[in-house]
Image (cartoon, rainbow, N blue to C red):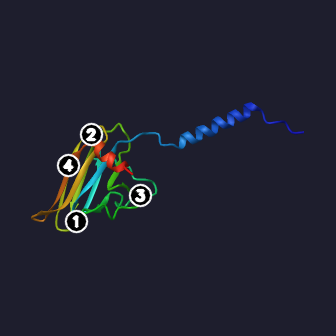
Amino acid sequence: MQRPISFTYIIIVTICSLMNIIALMPATKAYEVLLRNWGGYSGVDCAVWEEDYNRHFITYIPPDAPHNGVSYHFNCATFNGMDSSADIRNGVLTQKTLDNSTTYWVIFAANDGFGHNSNYKGGYNTNTCFHVLGGGGGHWKPRADLYEAPYEECQQIRDSK
């Protein structure tokens, strides 16, 4: 004769199952860095990423993305050429830092095969938005312009239907 399953056993199994589900959820929140491409030159390669005070790369790369730079490199004229794991909605690229407790800097770089240029803004402890413009320039040094914009403006554009 089998013993019936006790109510206590069911409660314990349910609690353990919920604890495992919660453990699989991301444990930390991250800062969002929203980027709007203001155009640029199609023959120039641009990249944007985040670093901490010690210049450590702290841009979140999804686990399924190849770790060869295509998650944050793109054609300067558009965001074309980025890996499919890039979060681009309504022309706004969303990047995230690894957590929301590390002060970060946004680095924007352009390379046209003849020269390299970069620009950065930093010391942020909040969500941010930037307009990026890469390419052109002169004297073998492409432009790498990074303009801060209101986060809410970029968020509204990204989230509009």
The numbered disc on residue 103 is none
Q: Measure the C-alpha gap from mark 4 to mark 3.
A: 25 Å
Is residue 12 toward the left or the right of residue 115 in the image?
right
Secondary structure, mark 3, is loop
Residue type of the residue flagged with mark 2? Tyr
Q: What residue is pinned by disc 4?
A: 147
Residue type of the residue flagged with mark 3? Ser
Question: Residue at (37%, 48%) from the top-left corner?
Answer: 159
Report the mark closest to the observer, 4 or 2.
Answer: 4
Residue type of the residue flagged with mark 4? Tyr
Label 2 with label 1: CB-CB less than 8 Å: no
Report the mark closest to the observer, 4 or 1.
Answer: 4
Q: Measure the C-alpha gap from mark 1 to mark 3.
A: 22 Å
Residue placed most toward the observer, 40 or 26:
40
Question: Residue at (22%, 46%) from the top-left corner?
Answer: 148
Q: Measure the C-alpha gap from mark 2 to mark 1.
A: 28 Å
Q: Residue 78, position in %: x, y? A: 28, 62
Q: What residue is pinned by disc 3?
A: 85
